Image: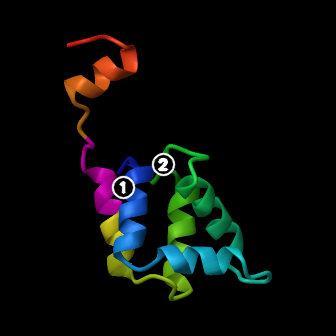
Amino acid sequence: VGAVSREQFAGWAAGNGLRAKIEDCAGTPGNPLRSVALTLLDVLRGGFTGIDLSSNNNQAMLGAWVAADAITQAQADELIALATTPDPITVDQVSDALNVET
């Protein structure tokens, strides 16, 4: 298990109808998932490049969402699967990053 990119996470959240739930939890004082939801919003808004699911802390946060019935175990497993699938980098992406024409 590795990292899931911001783009992968955004697609997963939108595809599972969780984007609004993240926003709702983040905006509700006293919600037990609020701190995690605020961090997930930081990811979605570009504060981080992704989520490292090899981190025990990040896996615990994901587990908290399952335990609170905010997501299903199947949804969590789907996110973990994204973190185990390589996100290929193309030659064009490398040359763009280096400002080199191919």
Residue type at numbered disc 1: Gln
- Inter-mark Cα distance, 1 to 2: 8 Å
Q: In the rendered view, does 56 fall on the left or right side of 42?
A: left
Say which residue appears at 71% left-offset and 68% top-offset.
35
Q: Crowding at label 2, few (<14), some or many (≥20) Cα neighbours within 10 Å?
A: many
Inspect the magenta stretch and tell me whether residue 30 lies in it: no
Q: Crowding at label 1, few (<14), some or many (≥20) Cα neighbours within 10 Å?
A: some
Question: Marks 2 and 1: in contact by CB < 8 Å?
Answer: yes
Residue that numbered label 1 is attached to: 8
Q: Nearer the viewer, residue 5 or 20?
A: 20
Q: Secondary structure at mark 2?
A: strand
Residue that numbered label 2 is attached to: 50
Establish if 82 lies above or below 65.
above
The span picked out in magenta is: 80-87
Quadrant (top left/top right/bottom left/bottom right) for the C terminus: top left
Instruction: Identify the disc placed on residue 58.
Output: none
Say which residue appears at 65% left-offset and 79% top-offset.
25
Say which residue appears at 28% left-offset and 61% top-offset.
81
Say which residue appears at 50% left-offset and 88% top-offset.
69
Inspect the magenta stretch and tell me whether residue 83 lies in it: yes
